[in-house]
Image: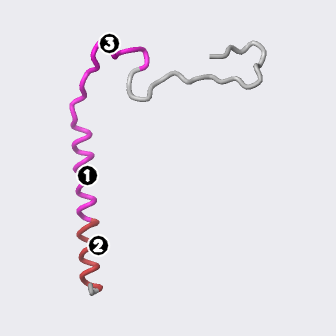
Amino acid sequence: MITDAQLYSLAVFLGSAAMLLIVFYHFLEVNAVEDELSSDLQSESQGVGATKPVVAVVGGAPGVEKR
């Protein structure tokens, strides 16, 4: 069986390793070189998930367009 002292040491080691990996990931993310989009991919709304919202009208309110 694993003793309390071994479990404590393992928890401290794994916690420290996780924190180091998180700091390393953020270091890489901050210093990453951003690639420019090619001209055929650029539009007025750039980026992943940057889309215009779809307006759904239930019941057809007067003076409101459906898209």
In the image, residue 50 lies at what x, y percent? 45, 26
The magenta segment is: 16-45
Q: Which residue is mark 2?
A: 11
Query: Mark 1 against mark 2, which lies toward the viewer?
Result: 2
Question: Mark 1 or 2 closer to N-term?
Answer: 2
Splitting the image into 4 quarters, where does residue 21 fall? Answer: bottom left
What's the CA distance linking mark 1 and mark 2? 18 Å
* Quarter in which the N terminus is drawn: bottom left
User: Which residue is depicted at the point 76% across and 19% down?
Assistant: 60
Q: Which residue is mark 1?
A: 23
How many residues crowd around disc 1 within 10 Å: few (fewer than 14), some, or many (20 or more)? few
Three-letter amino acid code at disc 3?
A: Asp
Q: Is residue 18 above or below residue 2?
A: above
User: Which residue is depicted at the point 26% across and 71% down?
Assistant: 12
Question: Mark 2 or 3 closer to N-term?
Answer: 2
Residue sitting nearer the eye, 16 or 62: 62
Question: Mark 3 or 1 closer to N-term?
Answer: 1
Q: Does the residue at mark 1 contact the one at mark 2 (Cβ under 8 Å)?
A: no
Q: Which residue is mark 3?
A: 40
